Image: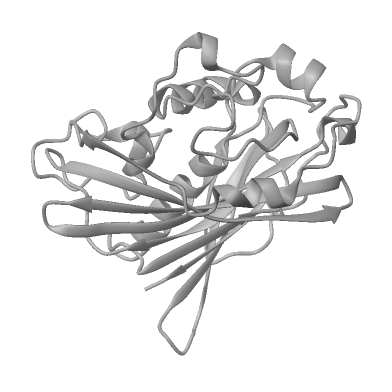
């Protein structure tokens, strides 16, 4: 059992900032970030990059000696040193103001916005909210909030076959895909994500107790925001919010679905991964 986090100490990280810059390359602007399954033509200078291309930019490179057992950098630098070993990307929100384009120099300024704790069915949960501002020479491109959740390893259940997916719910638009291990590896490489739950089957099943490799939360978000935008003639949503409900594992067939609703502020697309896995809301 991991010691309960000292919330007062962890909240001392609120307000901590860091910044990093990178160039939007043709590699970033083409297929894998836009659609890791189908790909895309070779991007050229000035082309609009995928809506979530900033997740591929300016990723920190730490020496191997500074990585934890899970493949992430050891905590206590920019992110607070939450002692709970399991880490997941729980959700967040994106606001789009301007497209990132191939050739842009993009700067990401990040700030720890909040640290909270609650007790759930799996034990103590610690949530860290991080705000990001992505800017180019033209001004603000994207404003983002990421919600990261940490929990204890003792809550893990023995590995067991993943439950079969429920019957797909009815939706106006849907596409089926497979959570292929090669797809997970490619996205980890694209985003320089060393988290072993996405590519190391021995680690994720024997150490963290999951039934298989876990589909990246941000890749699900990338799939869905691109799908919704395609249904809107390629236009970026004004706001895109998302929340993870339960993990999606390798070998699972999933659907990206879209159900449109009317809202007093404009059209809203409510989207789903495999039913009950993740929910997203896009507003134009």
The percent position of residue 5, horizontal first and vertical second, equals 77, 42
The C terminus lies in which quarter of the figure?
bottom left
Side (left or right) of 72 relative to 266: right
Give the residue displayed 49% in from the left and 49% down from the top: 221
For the N terminus, give its image quadrant: top right
Where residue 133 sits, quadrant-wise, is: bottom left
Residue 157: image quadrant is top right
Please state which of residues 240 and 179 is positioned toward the viewer in this rendering. Answer: 240
Which residue lies at the image location 42% right of the left edge and 79% below the top edge? 267
Residue beneath the point at 56% across and 36% down? 216
Q: Position of residue 12 (x, y in %)?
A: 59, 50
Q: Position of residue 36 (x, y in %)?
A: 41, 33
Q: Is residue 39 visible?
A: no
In this picture, residue 170 sits left or right of residue 232 = right
Residue drawn at x 65%, y 31% as measured from the top left? 214
| Left or right: 75, with 206 as reference point | left
Q: Is residue 243 visible?
A: yes
The percent coordinates of residue 110 (x first, y second) are 39, 48
Q: Is residue 195 left or right of residue 223?
A: right
Outermost residue, bottom side: 264
Front one among 218 and 11? 11
Residue 225 vertical placement versus 250 (above, below): below
């Amino acid at each position: 059992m991991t010691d309960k986090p000292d919330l007062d100490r962890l909240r001392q990280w609120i307000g901590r900032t860091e910044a990093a810059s990178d160039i939007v390359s043709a590699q970033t602007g083409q297929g894998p970030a836009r659609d890791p399954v189908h790909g895309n033509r070779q991007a050229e200078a000035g082309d609009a990059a995928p809506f979530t291309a900033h997740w591929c930019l300016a990723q920190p490179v730490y020496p191997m000696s500074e990585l934890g057992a899970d493949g992430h950098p050891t905590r206590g630098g920019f992110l607070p040193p939450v002692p709970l070993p399991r880490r997941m990307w729980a959700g967040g929100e994106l606001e789009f103001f301007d497209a990132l384009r191939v050739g842009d120099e993009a700067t990401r300024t990040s700030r720890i916005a909040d640290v909270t704790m609650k007790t759930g069915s799996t034990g103590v949960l610690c949530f860290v909210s991080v705000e990001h501002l992505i800017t180019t020479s033209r001004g603000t491109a994207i404003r983002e909030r990421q919600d990261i959740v940490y929990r204890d390893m003792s809550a893990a259940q023995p590995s067991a076959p993943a439950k079969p997916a429920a019957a797909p719910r009815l939706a106006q638009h849907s596409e089926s895909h497979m959570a292929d291990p090669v797809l997970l590896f490619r996205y980890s490489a694209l985003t320089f994500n060393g988290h072993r739950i996405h590519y190391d089957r021995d680690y994720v099943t024997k150490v963290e107790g999951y039934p298989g490799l876990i589909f990246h939360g941000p890749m699900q978000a990338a799939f869905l925001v691109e799908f919704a935008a395609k249904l809107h003639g390629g236009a970026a949503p004004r706001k895109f919010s998302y929340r993870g409900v339960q993990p999606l594992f390798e070998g699972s067939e999933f659907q990206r679905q879209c159900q449109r609703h009317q809202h007093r502020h404009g059209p809203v697309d409510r989207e789903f991964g495999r039913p009950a896995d993740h929910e997203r809301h896009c507003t134009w």
